[in-house]
Amino acid sequence: MKKSVIIGFLGTQLDSGWHDSRWDRWRPTVDITRHDDLLVSRLVLLYDSRNQRLLAQVLADIAAVSPETRVEPVLLDLQDPWDFGEMYAALFDFAQGFPFDTEHEDYWVHITTGTHVAQICWFLMVEARYIPGVLLQTSPPRRQKSGDPGSYTLIDLDLGRYDAIAQRFARAHDDAIALLKSGIATRNLAFNQLINEVERVAVRSKAPMLFMGPTGAGKSFLARRVYALKKARHQISGAFVEINCATLRGDGAASSLFGHVKGAFTGALQDRAGLLKSAHQGLLFLDEIGELGLDEQAMLLKAIEEKTFYPVGSDKESGSDFQLIAGTNRDLRGEVRNGRFREDLFARINLWTYQLPGLADRQEDIEPNLDYLLAQQAAELGHHLRFSKEARQLYLNFATSPAARWQGNFRDLSASIMRMATLAEGGRIASVQVYEEIRRLEQLWQSDSTPPTTALNALLSTEQWEGLDLFDCLQLEAVIAICQSSNSLSEAGRTLFSVSRQQRSSANDADRLRKYLAKFGLAWPAIKAGNG
């Protein structure tokens, strides 16, 4: 078994006593050696030269009650034992020079004696592992009686050893993750791992963060959630300040960011603080940072590193202590190679970089985000919103299909839900609204540089196409869109004939749809394959 080594201060008040009556008092340094269940091999006792007489008395008393304990006095003269800097430096030097032998000895740091400053320093030393041990807290007996040494407790600062504390940390971590995701139960593994690391970095660091990803991937949204998380943890007190750098042009760019003084340029009629100053003690989100000019990049680098900058037209420095989150949809490494982005600034903001995937790469997250956005719209419109069962499945089939390009990512999804919610009769989104929305999205995603194409181009020959009336073309396009977003002929038929089928005693939706398609020489397998 390892030997027990206790390190602590001689208690100038608690350990004092000169007469025989001292044995009727609880004296922590003496009494820690009197426990029947504890064998103290060594007691390292720090003392001040002004307490030589008390030290001699305590040494004699320990020798009387625990002759097997070897006491090693260590002189530690301090000008002011209540000065934190002096106390910490002295204990740090003590710990650095102490011959710890963790293979053969256990170290307990006695925090009951000494000044409150000493107790704090002991805690910091053990927590930082400068002293490889645990804290020892001793307490007097509840009822003072001769011979009772009181009680003692060991405190291990490795919080992972405490199940209840570990569970509370886990709950706090889960709550933080939920806050970052606004309670959306995202399912994409890569995105969830990204958010998990963002949470840990956000609560432990003030270093810049860089969110990369396509427009609409949620960079601004995530930056706001990071701010909310740090605000909830009391790690930040200032405002959230956001600017899209693509909107900053010419002479006004530096003024917007760093402020200006009155008369700095034509139109500068009064002083302006600027966005960096507004973000003092808060969080500054610079979206599309790659759009900043090189001069502004140089000024921003100084502001990040030194927390100071010069407002436009001023020869007096201004200061702002802010945390930076930058966003971009550009390849900043390529911009650095091409001389359009400063290498030193990129190195400074590239410490914590996260690539946010687009919506098309997170298809499994479309459904939970749909529910979140629908709840948002319901709150905004002031009434309950819901999909019919067929409409919900129709929309999800399309939204997760290759036909759904989601060029604007979550912005497209949010706008789509808003349109359907607005047009919903009685708060119910039916298949007809979904079909109309699919048409809108397909038109939205058509490239301006290429002629619009439809499913009919691939399914019908030129002769067939030219032989159809516009009415038939529009109707057939609508039917094909429903078919391609459905899993079976029957499902597509139920969607297309959802009203009239209720009036039939025996509804064979698949047969009705098959006959309709046959009029144009089309069959279900060809439609699903996307070619004639």
Image (cartoon, grey):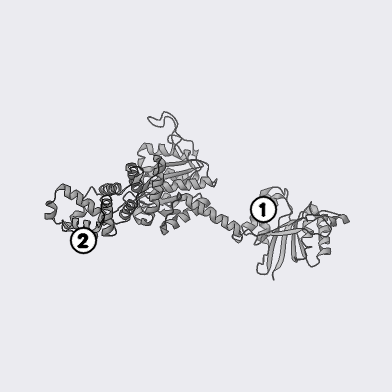
Q: How many marks?
A: 2
> Which one is nearer the viewer's eye here, 34 or 314?
34
Give coordinates of residue 246: x percent, y percent: 35, 43
> Which one is nearer the viewer's eye here, 167 or 432?
432
Give coordinates of residue 135: x percent, y percent: 68, 58
Mark 1 crowd level (few <14, some 14–19, many ≥20, 10 Å Cα): many
The residue type indicated by label 1 comes to Cys
Q: Which residue is mark 1?
A: 121
Give coordinates of residue 465: x percent, y percent: 14, 53
Q: Residue furthest toward the top?
A: 269
The residue type indicated by label 2 comes to Ala
Q: Is residue 410 visible?
A: yes
> Which one is nearer the viewer's eye here, 284 or 156?
156
User: Where the N terminus falls, by quadrant?
Assistant: bottom right
Q: Is residue 322 above or below residue 136?
A: above
User: Where the C terminus falls, by quadrant?
Assistant: bottom left
Q: Residue at x 69, y 61 (%)?
A: 108
Q: Residue furthest toward the right?
A: 20
Instruction: Give the left or right position of residue 74, taking residue 457 as reference.
Output: right
Q: Is residue 166 above or below residue 234?
A: below
Residue 145 figure quarter:
bottom right
Q: Is residue 343 visible?
A: no
Element type where label 2 sits in the image: helix
Give coordinates of residue 344: x percent, y percent: 42, 50
Q: Residue furthest toward the bottom?
A: 1
Q: Is residue 417 above or below residue 55?
A: above
Element type where label 1 sits in the image: helix
Instruction: Give the left or right position of residue 391, taking residue 466 as reference.
Output: right
Residue 526 disc label: 2
